Amino acid sequence: MADPKALVAGNWKMNGLMASVAEIEKLNALVTEDAAGCDILICPPATLIAILAGKGIDIGGQDCHWDASGAHTGDISAVMLKDLGCRYVIVGHSERRADHGETNDIVRVKAGAVQQQGLTAIICVGETDGEREKGETLDVVTSQLTGSIPEAATADNTVIAYEPVWAIGTGKVPTTDDVAEVHGTIRALLRDRFGDGGERVRILYGGSVKASNAGELMSVPNVNGALVGGASLKADDFYGIIKTYQ
Ligand code: PGA
């Protein structure tokens, strides 16, 4: 089966002000019709979603509540994200898991809420440095994955992002052999879960991806794109990663 079309997704995290609209406009100008060999997504902070939606580049959420509406001060729902035109929502990012105590159970219900709206959930998994040192990487990723994919998920509304926690924002990246091992394990789990459909689920690598290492990382088997933090904030840097797929 052919590899799924790659997805290069930018996660702006808690960065971006009104002035950042210019970066999206610049990115749009850089990405011409025939140049984009991959799908492109930016997940800005919630404050900018309404402003950036409709400017050409796909816009997604960084998180959502599992309820559609109600008394949840400070939260936003998948229904609201859909209302603004989002097609993707990141769930279970390691920063949400660490800063907000999000367990696999919470991530699973959030992903379910996303998928119930007809949106695609980008479900994040990844080991800490301590877990890697103890040789627990594959066990951790396996239990996060099996615990975080909703019962009703399909191969078409699920994207997985493998992000080793120790590689996020640190400039450190795993070896290509290590990435291949984890992504191969995730692919096997997806095949078990979705049958042949498991082949078309995109598995993104995330953690210190930049233009200078994207070519190597994106050519690893079962790597179908990237989830990019720091290097997605500037259009030129992000475009350097997108160009890997031209
Ligand atoms: P980074 O972040 O590219 O800045 O390492 C990746 C992420 O957390 O999604």
Image: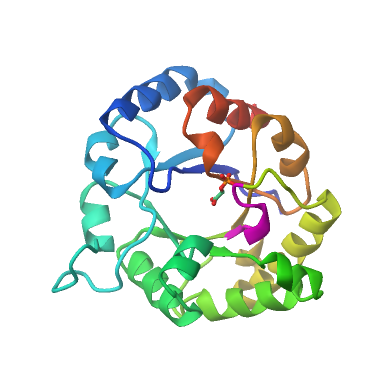
Residue farthest to the left? 71
Viewer-proximal residue, 51 or 199? Answer: 51
Q: Quadrant of the C terminus?
A: top right
Tally of marks:
0
Q: Where's residue 228, x and y in %?
A: 55, 43
Q: Is residue 166 magenta?
A: yes
Q: How is the image coloured?
A: rainbow
Residue 99: quarter of image:
bottom left
Residue farthest to the right? 177
Residue at coordinates 35% horizontally, 65% vertically from top-left?
114
Q: Is residue 185 magenta?
A: no
Viewer-proximal residue, 165 or 242? Answer: 165
The answer to whether 245 appears left or right of 43 in the picture is right
The answer to whether 18 appears left or right of 245 in the picture is left
The answer to whether 140 appears left or right of 12 in the picture is right
- Residue 71 in the image: above or below residue 1: below
Residue at coordinates 27% horizontally, 40% vertically from top-left?
48
Residue 202: quarter of image:
bottom right
Q: Where's residue 122, x and y in %?
A: 49, 59
Residue at coordinates 54% horizontally, 63% vertically from top-left?
124
Residue at coordinates 81% horizontally, 58% vertically from top-left?
178
Q: Where's residue 185, x and y in %?
A: 75, 68
Residue 167 appears in the rendering: yes
Q: Quadrant of the N terminus?
A: bottom right
- Residue 108 in the image: above or below residue 225: below
Viewer-proximal residue, 153 or 100? Answer: 100
Residue 156 appears in the rendering: no
Q: Where's residue 26, x and y in %?
A: 41, 19
Q: Which residues are magenta?
A: 161-169
The answer to whether 179 appears left or right of 65 in the picture is right
